[in-house]
Amino acid sequence: MLAIKIFQIDAFASETFRGNPAAVCLLPHWLDDKTLQLIAAENNLSETAFVVPTEAAGTEEAPLTLRWFTPKYEVPLCGHATLATAFVLFNELAGELAEHFANVQEIAFSSKSGLLKVAKREQLLELNFPRIEYRALEQDQWPQLLIDGLGIMPLEIYQGVSADKYLVVFQDHDQVVSLSPDMAKLTQLHPYGVITTAPALEYDCVSRFFLPSFDVPEDPVTGSAHCFIAPYWGERIEKSQILARQVSARSGELHCQLVADRVLIAGQAVKYLAGEIYIPSQG
């Protein structure tokens, strides 16, 4: 049997039972895709991150490879599971690996979305992610399944150009909080996820994110969605720094900064679980 170290981290949270839980699996070597997907399905969290930590990698010149799986599919980008992975590498390793990562301030990852970095920023971990470009949809272009699935008429709808996401803008915080989507209808929008957002009093914006076709009906706190949310609100309110809150049942706070074609997204993380999983040896 192959023993794999696993951690469950609450990302974008300062205490357990808040934010977005992600599993992080530290692999001794890469396993086949079928096994990775089975592990993610067994974990049954919105995301499981897989990484093979080595002392020779983690820099921009030699980044670590990072992959993310929902219970159903591999995805090209995940913010909270990247934050969780960096938290584990910075804080939960043993021996020489622990010493190596404790002495660095930034970790670089190679991913399906290119080079990603996570840096220590005092009490926060800061993601350096690609900005999502988007375009406005005229009302006659609004997908009827999207309108019917949300059940409340929005003010505007935008479509991601560089990602399969819709950004649906509502009038106020209460409309976003009160949404009770028809997940069967939103599932038919596959592979699109649905971000809902509105202005807020204590924050620059609030949001919720639905991805039911990936077996994630509502994601609690979504870093990658803020690659879309932050540029939209930054342009709308003419700010380069956006304080955002995702108002799911678990909720979480994200500190976003727009820098050229990148979005810096910072938050806290806490450990909930550490252990081992056992799978049949391969090869």
Image (tube, helix red, strand yellow):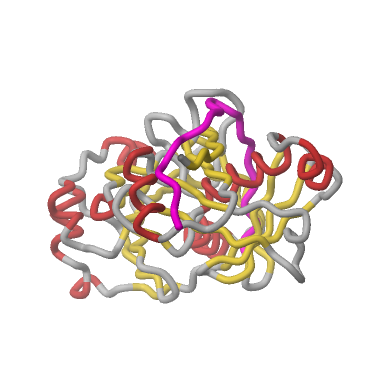
Residue 177 picture location, percent across and down = 33, 36
Residue 173 location (% of width, % of height): 39, 40
- Residue 264 painted magenta: yes
* Residue 101 lies in the magenta stretch: no
* Count of numbered circles in the view: 0
Q: Main secondary structure of the magenta part?
A: strand
| Residue 115 occupies quadrant | bottom right
Location of residue 107 in the rendering, given as x and y in whole percent from the top left corner: 73, 55
Please state which of residues 222 and 45 is positioned toward the viewer in this rendering.
Answer: 45
Magenta residues span: 263-283
- Looking at the image, residue 95 sits to the left or right of residue 70; the answer is right
Q: Residue at x 39, y 50 (%)?
A: 197
Instruction: Pick whichever, 147 or 227, lies toward us.
Output: 227
Relative image position of residue 32 (x, y in whole percent): 42, 60
Q: Residue at (73%, 41%) from the top-left corner?
A: 90
Q: Is residue 253 above or below residue 47?
A: above
Q: Quadrant of the C terminus?
A: bottom left
Left or right side of 131 for 166: left
